[in-house]
Amino acid sequence: MINKGDKVVMHTCMEAQFHEGIVWDVSYDEFTRNGQHPVVFLEGFSGSFAVEYLRKVDPSEETIECIMCDTQVLADSKGYIPGTKLGSYWCKECAVEEEKQQKILKEVEQMKITHTVFKNSDLEKAAKEFSNRVKTDLEGIAVVVNHVRKDEGRSRNPRYIVINTDENPRMIEEIIKVMKRFGKWGLTS
Ligand SMILES: [Zn+2]
C-alpha cells in the first residue's frame, strides 16, 4: 500500500526510463477506479500513476539533490550527472536544459552585436540611484539618431521585439530557428 507522504521511484516502464532514479513524493493515497489497477498521484507529475510501476524508497537509500531544481535522485542510479563543483549534481532533465542553454549562448556569442538595448526599468533605477542625466542623455541620443534615420528616409522610432537570450532555452532555440528560416539570423545591418 502506497500512501500520501511516501517517497517512491518508478520502475520497469517507459516513464521510469525517462525519470530514472527520480524520487517522487506521493500526494494522494493509493486508490482504485472502477475495479482497475490501483493508482496514486505524485507531486509534480500530471495524471495518476499505476502503483505496480512504483516502489517505495527505503529511508536508508542515499539520494542526491539537483542543484538547479532540488529534485531528489537515488544516488544508486543513472538519473543524474556530477556538476563542475565537487559534490554538486544535476538531474538529467536540468543537465539537458543546461546543455541547450550553453549551446545557445555559444551561438549568440558569435553574433555581431547590431543593436543596443536597455531595459526601461533598469534606466529608471539608474536614474534614481545615480543621476537623471542617464535618462536625458539617452533621450538626446534618441533625438539625434531619429534625425539621421529621417534624413535617410527611414522610419522614425522603430519598434523591436526584444527577447533576452537567458529565457527558456527551448523557446530561444525555436526563435533562432525561425529567424534563420527568414534570413534574419546573422545579419549585420
Ligand atoms: Zn534538476
Image (tube, rainbow, N blue to C red):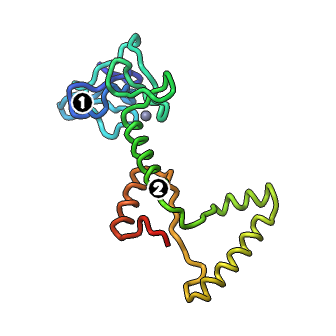
Q: Image quadrant of residue 136? A: bottom right
- Which of these two is toward me, 19 or 104? 104
Mark 2: secondary structure: loop
Q: Are marks 1 and 2 in contact (CB under 8 Å)?
A: no
Q: Residues within 10 Å of mark 1 (few under 14, many from 20)?
A: some
Whereabouts is ligand 1, in terms of quadrant? top left
Residue denoted by label 2: 110
Q: Residue at x 32, y 25 (%)?
A: 78
Estimate the x, y position of residue 165 in percent, counting from the top left: 49, 54
- What distance separates the C-alpha of mark 1 from that of mark 2? 48 Å
- Which of these two is toward me, 87 or 66? 87
Q: Residue at x 64, y 81 (%)?
A: 146
| Amino acid at circle 2 | Gln
Q: Residue at x 40, y 31 (%)?
A: 91
Q: Residue at x 43, y 31 (%)?
A: 90
**Above or below for 104 versus 136:** above
* N-terminal label among 1 and 2: 1
Mark 1: secondary structure: strand
- Which of these two is toward me, 91 or 4? 91
Residue denoted by label 1: 50
Q: Quadrant of the N terminus?
A: top left
| Amino acid at circle 1 | Ala
Estimate the x, y position of residue 62 in percent, counting from the top left: 41, 15
- Which of these two is toward me, 95 or 32? 95
Q: Residues within 10 Å of mark 2 (few under 14, many from 20)?
A: few
Left or right relative to 54: residue 61:
right
